[in-house]
Amino acid sequence: MDNQLISFTEENYLKIIYLLTERHNGNEVSTNQLAEHTQTKAASVSDMLRKLAEKNYINYRKYQGVTLTAAGEQIALGVIRKHRLWEVFLVEKLGFGWDEIHDIAEQLEHIDSKELTKRLDNFLGNPQFDPHGDPIPDAKGKMPSVSYLKLSEIPLNQSVVMMGVSVHSPAFLQHLDKQQITLGCDLKVLEISDFDKSYSILLDGKNTIFVSNEVAKNLLVSIEE
Amino acid sequence: MDNQLISFTEENYLKIIYLLTERHNGNEVSTNQLAEHTQTKAASVSDMLRKLAEKNYINYRKYQGVTLTAAGEQIALGVIRKHRLWEVFLVEKLGFGWDEIHDIAEQLEHIDSKELTKRLDNFLGNPQFDPHGDPIPDAKGKMPSVSYLKLSEIPLNQSVVMMGVSVHSPAFLQHLDKQQITLGCDLKVLEISDFDKSYSILLDGKNTIFVSNEVAKNLLVSIEE
DNA sequence: ATATATTTTTAGATTAGTCTAAAATTTTGT
DNA sequence: ACAAAATTTTAGACTAATCTAAAAATATAT
Ligand SMILES: [Mn+2]
Ligand SMILES: [Mn+2]
Ligand SMILES: [Mn+2]
Ligand SMILES: [Mn+2]
């Protein structure tokens, strides 16, 4: 609608390059990593990288991995913005669980209409964060700044607020649901077991719950103001 | 999500075959008509028809045009259902005008998630008609029955209710907006000009407006109960 | 340092959807 | 009824995105 030049597939590559670069603190993304996340083979990724480099969406030196150019980043941020806004819609307006929305948002993120995105954003009350606690870039591509810590990095007996998750798999999210761990809840680590590094946590100042080390590493929190 | 077997393109062909068949009261749709509506060439349509016939979505005898099979019709109705539900969403929830929504709905109609469609339908209050007055098939593919007449077929001085349009172009819809002709308004033809067959119409029992014969032929109305 | 393992790229094919040009079929007009 | 016109199908080619297998480059490990 607004843009005929970029395909669905290209948008996906740029989005994934953005997210992986972010995850690696700005380091280049490798062909194999992209193959894994695009569910294709390395050979297919190489072809696509050549094409994206020709269009000046990525910085690409053969065998050296890729980063996004400013142009590529703008496209990636636009896709991520739509993905996260639609996720808010699905949870806040349609009542989906946070474990059910990702695959639907993977489709909705490619709907191409500036006006639609603008009106959707407005309809949702211009949210800054999606249902997983991930920041939503604004219309200009600016991300709200966040400084989350892993729960596993927080000292004992320090009260923190649950802000996000670093794994989005339905299994993990459903696991959190079962333990009643939700965004915004209050967490205080009481003890870490010597045996298996599992955590005893005081939840909302009321109940003590037990979570594995694996869970604690994937809970993003911030210290209460 | 629910169905890997049918492509975006195939869905479009089936939808268009449905709508054209309906428009021709059940008569076969020709290759050239499809080429026009799919914005492709007749040769491309022939290829696709062979493929859709192989998959048993259409009844196809070379040179004789096509109709949908029951399987093809179910798919078409599912796409049309999504298209019209999303149009309701765009108008009722996001405040778009009825002239702005079709192209966005053309994209949204291919989002594949039974659960999403179900929840969207519910969120919208299970609407039976879209913003153009077109009926919305239910989850089983059943269309609400409608019996609209063209305003041009209504006798003089017979009060009728505006129920739909048989042309969906933004230009036509904006023209109606300017004349304040909206779904649900009351119309009574006072006179048809001998000179150019244009209509004098009493709108909502208050103002007299003038519309061309072309407009009158594309307004769908029903007689007040 | 150099052989071995791993990663990445290239070469050559494949599939879906499209195109133009030519051939086949149907429709129309006298 | 039959020639001319229109429509539809087929033949052959193209592009985007993918694949497997082989070659090239880089990383690793003694
Ligand atoms: Mn997601
Ligand atoms: Mn998310
Ligand atoms: Mn429409
Ligand atoms: Mn409509």
Image: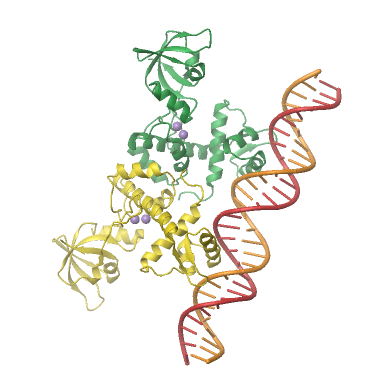
Chain colours: A green, B yellow, C red, D orange
D1 or B59: nearer the viewer:
B59
**Residue at point 32%, 63% (across, down):** B166
Left or right of residue B89, residue B109 in this image: right
| Percent x, y of residue B87 | 34, 50
Image location of residue A77, percent across then percent down: 49, 36
Q: Is residue B82 above or below residue B29?
A: above
- Residue at position x 28%, y 52% in the image: B128
Q: Is residue A127 visible?
A: yes
Answer with left or right where residue A73 lies relative to residue B102: right
Q: Residue at x 40, y 42 (%)?
A: A117
Numbered-mark total: 0
Pick the residue in front: B45 or A28. B45
Counting from the top left corner in percent of width and height, residue B160 is at: 18, 64
Q: Where, quadrant-wise, is the C terminus of chain B in this rendering?
A: bottom left
Task: Point out residue B40 in the picture as x, y percentages from the top left corner.
Answer: 51, 63
Does residue A140 appear in this view?
no
In the image, residue B32 above or below residue B204: below
Q: Quadrant of residue B217?
A: bottom left
Split into quadrants, the picture shows ligand 3 in the one at: bottom left
Does residue B114 lie above or below B200 as drawn?
Answer: above
Quarter of image, res B224: bottom left
